[in-house]
Image: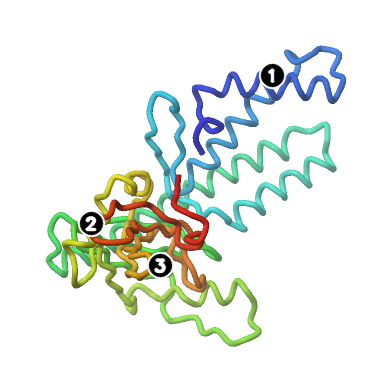
Amino acid sequence: RGPTHSFLLLPFWALAFSWILARLLREPGGWRALYGVTALGIALHIVGDLITNFGTMILWPLTTWRPGLGTTFIIDPWFTGIILAGLIAALFLRRKRFPSVAALATLCAYVGFQYVVKQQALEFGAEYARSHGIAGARIDAHPRPASPFNWTVFVSDEEAHRFAHVNLVRDKPKPYQPGDGFFARLDAAYLPPGQAVWVTRTRYGQTDQALIREAWESPPLGFFRWFAELPAFDGMTAKPDCTWFVDLRFLIPGRNDLPFEFGACREAPDRPWRAYQRDAIGKGPVR
């Protein structure tokens, strides 16, 4: 989500793709006839990424700022279903604008609805911070799969992240039985707000904090400090001596592992730190 997702470079990408399409489709009007719709398609893709919480560098190369509205999970069946319904309707009503206009309006309304729900999730986190006397806490709410009411709410300070998986409209837990299906298994993890289970993950562990901070602040991990929005300590291993960190943005109930697990490793206390990705440690340090 860097150069290919930059609004500043959009005119260049639209020119390149419209030229290629004109050659492939043998468009009599050349690339100019396709430039507008190509540019619009690319812009809609960028906006579609902006509504997730993973960040998009829309002003690259001027800045690596990564805004994200954070209303919509990366795979949302309702969002996708609205698009598919619009495409199918347009297939049968090819000469009508109504199907595409209606689908786009419904899609915008759905994202607006998700934004309202996110504010409720943020207020739930803020209330937890107030009731537990956590002054100056950063409150985050991240959308989760299966339902627009499923959220992971984070209350963070300089030492730890506290989080809970909640369904904002549920008044009792949703039981799950083996065989209920994939989405039912994902959905069951989100509890009613009144029964939320808060979990704490520290940024620098409980012991050896000086060593863990040294590893976290080492220059080789600079890229991960830039990337991770909710960094947390995730253990230490030996041979080589590694201190591991994760980004809790990607913590989803039902998923056994987290992506983007990185660590600072060194062969001895007097040797320099090197960055490794956990699942690729045998392949050498991160370049």
Q: Earlier in the sequence, mark 1 or mark 3?
A: 1
Tell which circle, 2 or 3, labels the residue nearer the N-terminal end: 3
Residue 271 sits above or below residue 68 on the image: below
- How many numbered tags mark residues here? 3
Identify the amino acid type marked 1: Tyr
The one of 186 and 87 positioned closer to us in this rendering: 186
Reading the image, the residue beneath label 1 is: 35
Distance CA(mark 1)–CA(mark 3)? 44 Å
Task: Give residue 19's mark.
Answer: none
Mark sitting on residue 270? 2
In terms of image quadrants, where is residue 209? Answer: bottom left
Question: On screen, 264 above or below 185?
Answer: above
Image point (34%, 67%), residue name: 234
Where does the image place residue 110, in percent across and percent down from the top left? 53, 49
Label 1 or label 2, whichever lies nearer to me, is 2
Looking at the rendered structure, which numbered label has been put on residue 168?
3
Circles 2 and 3: CB distance less than 8 Å? no
**Coloration mode:** rainbow
Question: Residue most toward the bottom?
Answer: 177
SS category of the residue bearing label 3 = loop
Q: Residues within 10 Å of mark 3 (few under 14, many from 20)?
A: many
Residue 107, placed above or below residue 13: below
Tell me if residue 72 comes above or below residue 174 in the rendering.
Answer: above
Residue ID at (20%, 72%): 206
Q: Please, what is the three-letter code of the amino acid marked with disc 3?
A: Leu
Q: Secondary structure at mark 2?
A: loop
Q: Name the front one of labels 1 and 3.
A: 1
Mark 2 belongs to which amino acid? Asp
**Number of other residues with Cα within 10 Å of mark 2, as a class: few under 14, some 14 to 19, many 20 or more:** few
Q: Look at 85% across and 24% down and name the residue there.
A: 25
